[in-house]
Amino acid sequence: MTLSSRWKILNKELGKWRDALAKAMDNHRSEENLSNGIILTGPAVVLNETPLRDSTTSNSPLNSPMSQDSPIEKEPRPIGRKAAKAKKAGNLSNNNSKFLEEIVRQNAIRIEMEQKHQENEMAIQAEYVREREYLPKKAMYKTDR
């Protein structure tokens, strides 16, 4: 790869570097450096009475405003071609599985409805058979009297 093909990415990264350097230069005081600031913010040392842990951690350099206002932002990395294809294939298989689950659910509902329909048909047939058996008996009772 040539430099000209990567210029857009490099220019963006160099811009971030330039901004970070400018911010560091603004925070830099004359004749001082970061170690002087850390030494001044450290706990007071008294011989033979130094506590094991300092209870005030707000003065630590990790909580400094520079680290919070840093111009360097974490951007997500772009997805590569292979990963994008794999993700797309994963979505397709996920959609296929959802589609198959829906088909199974609909088939279960259809089978349940068919069973209820068959039960109703059998109940109607049983009622019809009982009526057919009852009518001749009723007719027999009428003729016997």
Image: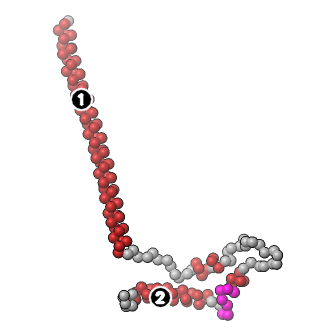
Q: Residue at x 18, y 16 (%)?
A: 136
Numbered label tally: 2
Which numbered circle lies on residue 14? Answer: 2
- The residue indicated by pointer 1 is 124
Q: Name the residue nearer the viewer: 33 or 28.
A: 33
Residue 81 is left or right of residue 67, and the answer is left
In the image, residue 7 sits, relative to residue 108, either above or below, namely below
Q: Position of residue 74 (x, y in %)?
A: 49, 77
Q: Residue at x 54, y 86 (%)?
A: 20
Residue 121 is left or right of residue 7, and the answer is left
Q: Residue at x 32, y 48 (%)?
A: 105
Q: Name the residue nearer the viewer: 29 or 145.
A: 29
How is the protein colored in the picture?
A: secondary structure
Name, please, the residue furthest toward the right: 48
Q: Position of residue 110 (x, y in %)?
A: 27, 44
Whether residue 32 is in magenta: the answer is: yes
Whether residue 10 is in magenta: the answer is: no
Task: Choose top left, top right, bottom left or bottom right for residue 115.
Answer: top left
Name, please, the residue furthest toward the bottom: 31
- Check disc 2 and give the amino acid type: Leu
Within-10-Å neighbours for mark 2: few <14, some 14–19, many 20+ = few
- Quadrant placement of the C terminus: top left
For the record, the magenta segment spans 30-36
